[in-house]
Image (cartoon, rainbow, N blue to C red):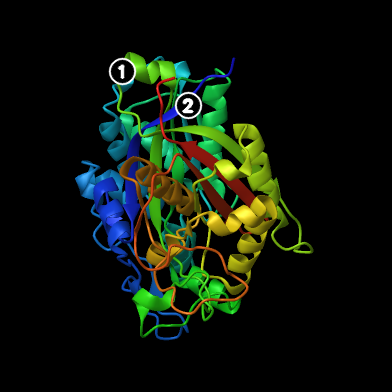
Amino acid sequence: MKRRVVITGIGVISPNGIGKENFWNALKKGKSGIRKITSFDTTDLPVKIAGEVIDFKPEDYIADKKKIRRMARFSQFAVACAKMAIEDSNLNLKKIETEKMLVCLGVSTSAMDLIESQHKKFLIKGYKGITPFGIFAATPNMACQEILNELSLEIPLTTIASGCAAGLDAIGTGYKEIQNGNYEVVIGGGIDASITSLIIGGLCSSNIMSKRNQEPEKASRPFDKFRDGGILSEGGAILILENLTHAIKRNAKIYGEIIGYGKWGEREITNPGQGFEYAMKLCLKDAFLKPESIDYISAHGPSDPLLDYFETLAIKKVFGEYSYKIPISSIKSMIGNPFSSGGVLQLISGIMALTQKILPPTINYEYPDPLCDLDYVPNKPRICDVKYCLVNSHGFGGSNSSLIIKKYEDK
């Protein structure tokens, strides 16, 4: 018999709030974290706005200042989120057998801040100008490694790179590992800190970014008729996943239960929305649920003219006429797109919706798009009793993932 998997701890770093309470309160109020970029000069760039985390202080979570200087920003986020989640879970790591615990994180672009700064030094001073630890600190698996270093752990670790879907895939992977009896506890989530001049420049060249520079808070407008592109952001989200028996034994607080996970890859778009569609179908199958069981969908919804439509189309294919009865919202309207951490931040918003009976809104939804004609919980939060929540995530390169959480019931 497969084991039940529950969520017992939450750690959050988001453009509109650090910590689960601040994050959730901002979502309920429809508070945007999108603002003018402050970390570098945007004079020569057509896009000058992003979802920066401006109030993060790594020294609040990492005592060793030398260690902080050696770490890329995404690794600092990872350590901070892991510590928040562990504290929130009241988890005593010393009481868990090391072979029964896993760290599993999703990343998208790794340590671009460090890579870019070191490359500039290399062009000026050659290899002697490069920081000795720079290459090692920039590898994608260092976020996991820094968690182990900071927590003095020697346990298995896994890094997943499936674009923006990587964080949700990390949670899905942890869920399956516990369900199949391989681990008791998984520290899992998504981390990305990619707001750099090169990344912004590359996205500008692809012409997929909003240029509403004069109205940053209104720039991300998923499903709105006049959306003109997404908003790059950064952040981190880590959850503590546990075998239900393990959680009950230690009298843990339980936020919700993961019951389904599905993923699907697609090649160049020939059948729009197919990846979203198949991921949702496989997720429902894994959860043994009918489409009509879903009470709320936390959409990928990046404010992209095409992707928002493709996701809407896929929801209609999976849910049929029932799709018009399901409330759907995109928190990216408030936080932008923080790449791999986006799906996990959506999951956390879904967890809070389960426990608080409030749906976060899709803000900036002012002009209905006839091609996106579902219920997107426009502009204001909504009271709603949610039992089953489905979360969608899509990544560059054709990765699509869906995950279902349910309200925890002791039966």
State which mark lies toward you, 2 or 1. 2
Q: Would you name the residue on which mark 2 appears?
A: 5
Residue drawn at x 46%, y 70% is: 231
- Residue 284 vertical placement versus 22 (above, below): above
Q: Amino acid at mark 1?
A: Lys
Q: Is residue 72 visible?
A: no
Residue 66 rendering spot, x and y as whole percentages: 26, 46
Q: Give the quadrant of residue 219.
A: bottom left
Q: Would you name the residue on which mark 1 appears?
A: 94
Q: Residues within 10 Å of mark 1 (few under 14, many from 20)?
A: few
Residue drawn at x 34%, y 46% is: 357
Quarter holding the N terminus is: top right
- Residue 163 vertical placement versus 308 (above, below): above
Farthest residue to the right: give it: 270
Q: Amino acid at mark 2?
A: Val
Residue drawn at x 45%, y 20% is: 184
Give how far apart the Cα atoms at labels 2 and 1 are.
21 Å
Residue drawn at x 26%, y 50% is: 58
Residue 264 rendering spot, x and y as whole percentages: 69, 47
Q: Residues within 10 Å of mark 2 (few under 14, many from 20)?
A: many
- Residue 41 vertical placement versus 154 (above, below): below
Element at label 2: strand
Q: Earlier in the sequence, mark 2 or mark 1?
A: 2
Q: Is residue 259 visible?
A: yes
Residue 212 rendering spot, x and y as whole percentages: 43, 83
Element at label 1: helix
